Amino acid sequence: MLERIKQLLKKISYLNAKINPTVLASSFAFYLLLTIIPLVILILNLLANLELIEVEEGLNLGNNFINILIFIFNLLWSSSKLTNNLLVISDVIYYNVEYRPRLKLRIISIILTILFIFIGILMIIVGMYLGYIKTKISANYTILLNIIQFFYPFVFITLFIAIIYKYVIPVKITVRQTLKSSSIITSIIFILTILYQNIINKIMISKYINIYGSLASIVTSLIWLYLNCYIFLVGIAILLFKDEYKENQKSI
């Protein structure tokens, strides 16, 4: 076990020197930032049309069909750029695989984007339903429901990352491998988020305000986003290590 961990760290160090994942994580974070805000607005408006929530006037897309189409087109463009960027990054990390046509990558990107929108809507609906149940059950079950509310995003994010790993990485990887790796990465992201909320966003924010002023919260959010992207890319490196380790074991 220790030997495998040592080999994994060696592989990550090698990839860090060869492909510079810090730069790749920066580009990934850039496209993610372009995508996440319009994606949230679209999901909120879809839920509002289903009469599940009410949306503030500033976030409402209105009933103008042309404006909605333009908004959705821009969202699909930016989000497909994000997933396409992931596909390109995967091809860089898996440098020993065959070239994948860019048109095929773009089509896969759009399909994945639509799937991610569906998962996002489902995640919000489940959260709202759990909140509704909480108001109807007795106090004896409140603790259990709070635990479920805390962990259900973990399940959705793990599924989200597993789908990306499964269909973005240019080699065949089993569902078990993707779920195992995505659960590890999701756990790290959750820990990082808790640290962000309780350390950076509460304790260190005053120091950032002295430097960046009113932009301090944006800067800290970008740092958090970048670290998450870097961890996500490390997950691809872990899957590469597992794939190569498995092949080496077969050849012995």
Image: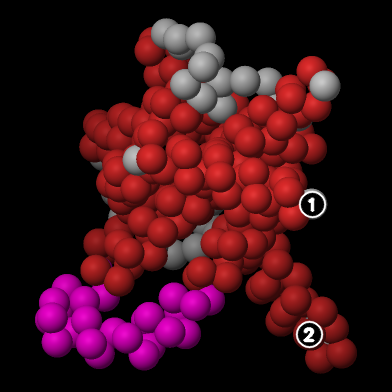
Disc 2 packing (10 Å; few <14; some 14–19; many ≥20): some
Q: Residue at x 70, y 62 (%)?
A: 152
x and y percentages locating residue 249 in the rendered image: 80, 27
Q: Which residue range is magenta in the image? A: 194-218
Q: Is residue 147 left or right of residue 204?
A: right
Q: What label does residue 142 carry, if any?
A: 2
Q: Which mark is residue 1?
A: 1
Q: Secondary structure at mark 1?
A: loop
Closer to the camera, 136 or 105? Answer: 105
Pick the front one: 157 or 97: 97
Identity, as a three-letter code, of the amino acid under mark 1: Met
Number of numbered discs visible in the structure rendering: 2
Quarter occupied by residue 87: top left
Q: CA distance from mark 2 to mark 1?
A: 40 Å
Q: Quadrant of the C terminus?
A: top right
State yes or no: residue 75 in magenta. no
Lateral position of residue 104 relative to residue 73, left or right: right
Work out whether 135 lies above or below 158.
below
Which image quadrant is residue 153 in?
bottom right
Residue at (63, 36) in percent of width and height: 241
